[in-house]
Image (cartoon, rainbow, N blue to C red):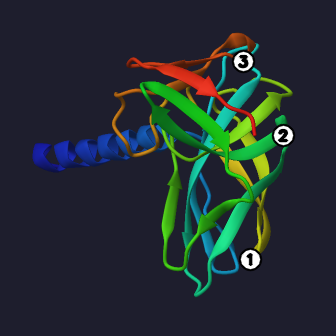
Amino acid sequence: MTSIVRRNIWLAGAGAGALALTLLAVPAAQATDYNVGPIQITAPWARATPKGASSGAAYMTITNTGKTPDKVSCVSSDASAECQIHTMTMDNGVMQMRPVEGGLEIKPGETVTLKPGGFHMMLVNLKHPLEQGNTVKATLKFDAAGTVDVEYPIAAIGAAAPGVPAGGGTMMMQGGGGMQMQGGGGMQMNKP
């Protein structure tokens, strides 16, 4: 065997080893997509919470491929006593969160992304902290399409949405259930 052939075989083996290491580095908890009728749910995820936090948040993208509007509500979660779809707005520099009454409408052909700083699923009265690397399960109810169980892989505390660069203002749940807006501004949670 010539030295060039030996070197190429060694490089091929090294490349296969690097590929194997790359595959091992992929997180075990990958998001799964879900379909219920004409509704598609993609990229579900949640953020880890600090020990003692009473609330957490989960996110996803919902697309209505149907010809009629539908509304989504969160029915239950294995990690919390209640789950609700919330909206977040800024009013005179104060962030306000409110439950979306009657469900979040998804119009025909529309895609709505639940993400930090906007619509999100609030997990209220946590039974245990949300831990990075685990999943949280929630049951979503669509008025027309039906009910679906969704698993949300849990990312790190303060993590950016998958595929979005980190940075900017982020909402974090604090121990004892308090909330903090990083990047300035106050925060207020209003009950219905």
Q: Is residue 125 left or right of residue 6?
A: right
Q: Is residue 158 visible?
A: no
| Front residue of 141 and 31 | 141
Which numbered dot is residue 82? 2
> x%, y% of residue 27?
55, 39
The dot on residue 159 is none
Query: Marks 3 and 2: in contact by CB < 8 Å?
Result: no
Q: Residues within 10 Å of mark 1 (few under 14, many from 20)?
A: some
Distance of label 1 from label 2 (alpha carbons)? 22 Å
Report if the CB atoms under discs 1 and 2 are less than 8 Å apart.
no
Secondary structure under tag 1 reads loop
Residue 12 in picture, x, y percent from top left: 28, 48
* Residue nearer the viewer, 122 or 49: 122
Q: What kind of element bears circle 2?
A: strand
Q: Secondary structure at mark 3?
A: helix
Q: Position of residue 154 (x, y in %)?
A: 63, 36
Q: Earlier in the sequence, mark 1 or mark 2?
A: 2
Left or right of residue 124, residue 24 in this image: left
- The residue beneath circle 1 is 145
The first of marks 1 and 3 along the sequence is: 1
CA distance for labels 2 and 3: 14 Å
Q: How many angstroms separate mark 1 from mark 3 (CA)?
A: 34 Å
Circle 3 Cα neighbour tier, 10 Å, few/some/many (<14 / 14–19 / ≥20): some
| Kind of residue sitting beneath label 3 | Gly
Q: In this view of the protein, which residue sits in the foreground, 97 or 27?
A: 97
Q: Is residue 66 above or below residue 72?
A: below
Q: Earlier in the sequence, mark 2 or mark 3?
A: 2
Q: Is residue 142 visible?
A: yes
Residue 178 x, y percent position in the rendering: 67, 16
* Residue on which the image places disc 3: 177
Mark 2, other Cα within 10 Å: few <14 / some 14–19 / many ≥20: some
